[in-house]
Amino acid sequence: MVLISKFLEMGQGVHSGIATLLAEELDADFSRIRIEAAPVDPRYKSAIQGFQATGASCSMAESWTELRQAGATARAMLVKAAADRWAVAPGSIAVAEGVVSHPPSGRCARFGDLAEAAAALPVPADVPLKAAADFRLIGKSGHRIDSRAKSEGSATFAADMAMDGLKVAVVAHPPRFGATVATVDDSKARAVPGVIEIVRIPTGVAVIARSFWTAKKGRDALVIGWDESKAETRSSAQIMESYRALAATPGAEVKNKGDAIGAMAGAAKRVIATSELPYLAHAAMEPIACVAALTADRCEIWAGTQVPSFDQKNVATLLGFAPEQVAIHTLLAGGSFGRRSVLSSDYICEAVEILKARPTLSPIRLQWTREDEFGAGFFRPMFLHRIEGGLDAGGRLVAWHHRIVGQPLFPRPDKFDFTSVEGAESCPYAVPQYIDIHSPQVGVPIWAWRAVGNTHSCFAIETALDEFAFAGGQDPVAFRRAMLQDEPHMLAVLDLATRKAGWGRKLGKRRGQGFAMHKYQGTADLKGPYGSYVAQVAEVTVAADGSVKVDRVVCAIYCGTVINPEIVRDQVESSIAFGLGAALTGQVTLVEGRVEQNNFDGYPVLRMNEMPKIEVHVVPSTDPPRGVGEPAVPVIAPAVANAIFAATARRIRALPIQPLTA
């Protein structure tokens, strides 16, 4: 049985999830389901995002009803076909594990035996779905549908693609963002045995060869003069300094809930908490790659892409083709975290630019190195948050003024960038709130990073709340609980996480507990309830030399109905690992416009020996499922920062945390 998936499988388990939904209502044999990627077609557009894409942790929320209805409808048609064939009542038919049977007579048939007859029947309307009590797959841990292929090496990624005449291209990109090619001396590069062609394209200079290593050697031999007249030449430290200056001035209003300004003026105590967060790399395990083939009237692309509909549109525009002349074949991806969703289709268009200039080179595989991804890629934007809290005489929070400064993903002259205020604009705490924002333009390429704006807003909000609670002489958890009376899901995760963690117990010298939580609602432009709620308690040990060891993390999540508990646990654990690595050591820094990091030696990710013990607890629910791929990412950094304060009385006001001086 083949299930056509409109979602990219990039390690998050979406293929297993959608197969579970279909198999549940169809009563199919899960082990016999095979997944194929959907072509680009309006029928496959996301009902939540509005175009064909995988992202925002909304795939399972979107599929919950859609695929269950498809499975139940197909099951009803198979039952009707069997009943007609055997001249029996449909109610006497049973279905299990891909077999349709008539128990009274002992007759049976597999789905394939009945498929043609079933397909000829009218499609029934309003087929009832199973009650939760009847689920045999949903809510149960099971095997992932892609485990065997990935384990044995038969799974196909872009770098695995093979076809007659395939050549490999690498591109020399500018050393500073915004620079362009001025001069090229390619004589030494052309002398490298195996180099086929060298092509100037808008993003740099491409070297095409029979193999990757030959192409790279050719690229290394290029002598390029760069025009840097329009390049970004500031350091990240200088950019942050400009943010600090902006943070001292009023910005554009984002939210004005209650009389926060008046309440602040009447507060008994006012406390200001600032947070500075760096550029971050996506750092997916699989480097960027895609295969492109071009003829006079057709272009084909093979890539692990999150937004095939935009890729088709961008390639068609580049070539002057109609969209239907461009085929996008979606492959597996070895991680993405947002990088493969860039709406300009940057690396895909880069491959097509080469073929547009030299059609005879078709087909090619464009391959980026890890160094390319740091030097020419996209980053989570750098942000500064300034939050002022007003406390009354009893230590309660009565006013909240939140100022945000950062580079917008979607600059809009008439309105603030919604991704810049994710998690801040939807802040659930019941207190008068005023939010304003500055959105400076910076010449550094940025894009969505796992959990997007929530990653910086959650850190700022949750560390500020701890600081305000301390200033008011309040327990940090009780301080939050008092402002969440209208947020039952937030209270549920708060209570579950703190109970399981044993909140408030003493851990010993230079050890501490920290709490943080977040209402992950995603972007305001998306439709439907797909956001989840997360609370975490982190336990840390801070050594005398300042090194931080995260010992334990207890996480509670409300995510509606759980389709596969094992995948939920996997995603929460991976989110914590991803967010923790960024919190401890992750940063991309620029010096005179040049990125200092170029691989994992300069941008370390969390190692096995640094992984804390993680406990994942799910709030039971029969509500429709919500996302689990991103919501736990933003919470770990503030939980750890707050734990460090508990252990050392030292506030973390900037990330990354390490090195933490003694």
Image: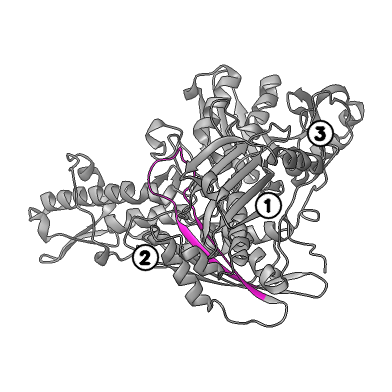
Q: Is residue 493 magenta?
A: no
Rendered position, 284 above or below 305: below
Q: Nearer the viewer, residue 490 or 351?
A: 490
Mark 1 or mark 2: which is in front? 1
Q: CA distance from mark 2 to mark 3?
A: 50 Å
**Residue at (27% x, 53% y) in the render:** 111
Residue plotted at (53% across, 79% down): 502
Q: Identify the image quadrant of residue 463.
A: bottom right
C-alpha distance separating marks 1 and 2: 39 Å
Marks 3 and 2: in contact by CB < 8 Å? no
Whether the residues at callouts 1 and 3 have beta carbons within 8 Å, the answer is no
Instruction: Look at the picture and state if 534 lies above or below 266.
Output: below
Amino acid at dot 1: Ser
Q: Position of residue 401 (x, y in %)?
A: 58, 47
Disc 3: CA contacts within 10 A as few (<14), some (14-19) or many (>=20): many
From this viewpoint, is residue 143 visible?
no
Query: What percent of the width, then of the height, locates residue 235?
Result: 82, 40
Amino acid identity at mark 3: Arg
- Residue 605: x, y in percent? 71, 58
Front position in the image: 130 or 545? 545
Mark 3, residue position: 176
Span highlighted in magenta in the image? 512-539
Q: Which residue is mark 2?
A: 139
State the image coordinates of residue 185 (x, y, percent, origin top left): 90, 24
Which numbered dot is residue 275? Answer: 1
Q: Nearer the viewer, residue 489 or 338?
A: 489
Above or below — where is 274 with respect to 217? below
